[in-house]
Amino acid sequence: MKDQRTVIIENALRVLRETGSSRLFLFLNTIPECRWWLRSGVDEKENIVVIVPQALEVNAPELQATCSAVIRSWSGNQSRFSRIKYAFLHGVMQGLINIESKVVCVLGPSGKNHLDTITIHDLSLSWSEEFPFDVRQLIRNRAFHTIMAVVDIALDIGALGREGKSVGTIFVIGDSDNVLRSSHQAVFNAFKGYAKRERKITLPEVVESVKELAKLDGAIIVSDDGVRQAPRCRRRCHKEAQGAGRQTQSRCRHYPGDRGRLRCCFRKHRQGDHLRQGPYHSHPGAADKRAAGVTQAMEGRVRLGISSCLLGEKVRYDGGHKLDRFLMDALGSFVEWVAVCPEVECGLPVPREAMRLTGDPASPRLVAVGTEVDHTDAMRAWAEKRLKGLEKEDLCGFVFKSRSPSSGLSGVEVYGPSGSSVGAGTGIFARAFIEKFPLVPVEEEDRLHDPVLLEKFIRRVFVFGRRIQSLLRAKVYY
């Protein structure tokens, strides 16, 4: 049986011939993939242009002998669309194709030894759409690659928003020292403490973080060499070793959990209320290294609301609890929990009759399963009072119990008169909470077992908390 990559390339060559395309652009991501190509034995190499990442250390002459040309391409980010687009730009600049050419592309996921996609592009129809400005005026600018990377991110944000919501932000490129001196930090800066090489605007993890922070940042400042900048601190760190200031040593904490461990490393420089973050690293063998964004970056512990049963409190209808050890291990050491049990706090006993949502999924009722007693009005009246109290708690987020008729955020079964499910809805208290506090980050406990979702939630919590602290210090109210 032929290798899948060989089959894909042979079919792509057939498409090239049948569509009258001038070139086949073959994207190779890794050294092993390049080695495979050298011994693949694929014919018609005179029509093939090999695209390799600019930073990949390959034997160029040896690779050149297997195709018509080799392009060392840079792209704004590592999405397939971006890699194809910048390969076209390099191809036009090198005279391999022109803006009227048809090109077939073969590629796979970034950084993988895998080919799984064939695309065909008519540049006469798409060039002005992919480059809606005169790129020739920018090519010689030292910030060209940075500008193109930022344009990619801005186009993504403008077209897709973030998590289904519209987003508006500003990117400032170049002259970053003067820009920083003329501005102040509005929200928590998630990039502070990272080395420059880890803040490059072309890194996929940085791109995703920028998109997330775009929901809050007034402006995102980028140096002309593509480094995401942070406003300078008012107090310089070298002064902190003098007088009352002192520097503490790095400290690490391990968070054991069923799906990997997180390690949070941070270095604190203290003078008054000044805090400086250090780099974050994932624990060797972590299920997902991106979950290592956890950091104790704020003054004291952040306050998170949580369904009481997740803390191990025996408040459930059957007298039991739903202690989430993973959540406690991962977050407990830098979070102050504010426990809430809607059923018990609104006056229901433990144990008690089980309840469920009934009626219209858009506006369900909270009804006891056996006696069919309707507790909706009592729950709503209690929630109104409880939410007024939570306003004073300065919550930076809330973790709800999934599938709970009072606290589930989504996917809670709603039943009709016949007793069968008629859809999914939101718990009574959870709905009231998100209506009262629409900006507070919320999540369900089972989703936080996913390292990617856990990291996103933690980032949102710290960004939200940092924003509140900044506003209070500046005495800005909204």
Image (cartoon, helix red, strand yellow):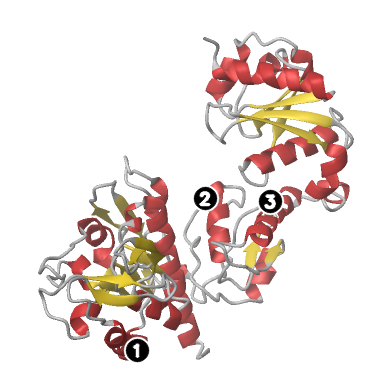
Q: Quadrant of residue 395?
A: bottom left
Q: Amino acid at mark 3?
A: Ala
User: Residue at position x 26%, y 76% from top?
Assistant: 367
For residue 109, side relative to residue 344 (left or right): right
Q: Amino acid at mark 2?
A: Glu
Which comes before the other along the chain, label 3 or label 2? Answer: 3
User: Residue at position x 53%, y 89% from top?
Assistant: 478
> In this view of the protein, can residue 14 be seen by the observer?
yes
Is disc 3 in contact with disc 2, using a CB cutoff of under 8 Å?
no
Q: Is residue 376 above or below residue 190?
A: below
Mark 3–mark 2 Cα distance, whole angstroms, equals: 13 Å
> To which residue does mark 1 refer?
384
User: Residue at position x 63%, y 46% from top?
Assistant: 77
How many other residues sit within 10 Å of disc 1, few (<14), some (14-19) or many (≥20)? some
Give the SS element for disc 3.
helix
Which numbered circle lies on residue 149? 3
> In this view of the protein, can residue 303 be seen by the observer?
no
Which numbered circle lies on residue 145? none
Give the SS element for disc 2.
helix
Q: Amino acid at mark 1?
A: Glu
Residue sitting nearer the eye, 18 or 135: 18
For residue 203, side relative to residue 65 (left or right): left
Q: Is residue 359 above or below residue 472?
A: above
Give the SS element for disc 1.
helix
Mark 1–mark 3 Cα distance, whole angstroms, equals: 47 Å
> To which residue does mark 2 refer?
205
Which comes before the other along the chain, label 1 or label 3? Answer: 3
